[in-house]
Amino acid sequence: MTVVRLEVREMRIGELARATGTTPRALRHYEQAGLLPSERAPNGYRVYDERAVVRVRNIRFLLDVGLTLEDVRVFVPCLDGDVAAAPPSGKGLEVALERLAVLDERIAAQTAVRDRLAEALRRVTGGRVRPAA
């Protein structure tokens, strides 16, 4: 039986940042949050497995859809795959639904504040100012 070893290229933090459209600071933040493992080169620089590109893109996707870093922790087991296309786990779905409820509450609160401000403007201007809808 022959064992085939795949060579995996290592990347420094700047290379990974460029490859994923993020910043070194964000990558360090993801690492500190336990989402992005790294190794240290003999010179002390962080080095990442080239597969980290997929992981970082998945982290960014989950953050971009409104999840927090804490929420993203639930998805750690699948961050190296296609998170956007895969069906969510029960826990992942629960976290996403909870986050959606929080966002809905915030939107409702902001809408109420906006409506109070619009009403106040209508009163003080005699209805001359019409806020954009």
Image: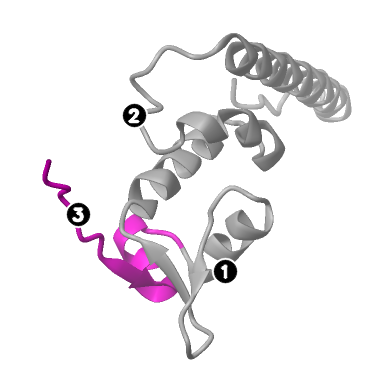
- Labelled pair 2, 1 in contact (Cβ < 8 Å): no
In the picture provided, is 29 more to the left or to the right than 5? Answer: right
Q: CA distance from mark 2 to mark 1?
A: 24 Å
* SS assignment at label 1: helix
For the C terminus, which image quadrant? top right
Q: Is residue 16 covered in magenta? A: yes
Residue 84 appears at what percent x and percent y?
A: 38, 25
Instruction: Please say if 133 is above or below 79.
Output: above
* SS assignment at label 2: loop
Q: Amino acid at mark 1?
A: Arg
Q: Range of the magenta residues? A: 1-22
Q: Amino acid at mark 3?
A: Arg
* Image point (31%, 58%), residue name: 50
* SS assignment at label 3: loop
Q: Amino acid at mark 2?
A: Asp
Q: Earlier in the sequence, mark 3 or mark 2?
A: 3
Instruction: Please say if 56 is above or below 23.
Output: above
Residue that badge 1 annotates: 25
Residue that badge 2 annotates: 82
Residue 28 appears at what percent x and percent y?
A: 59, 65
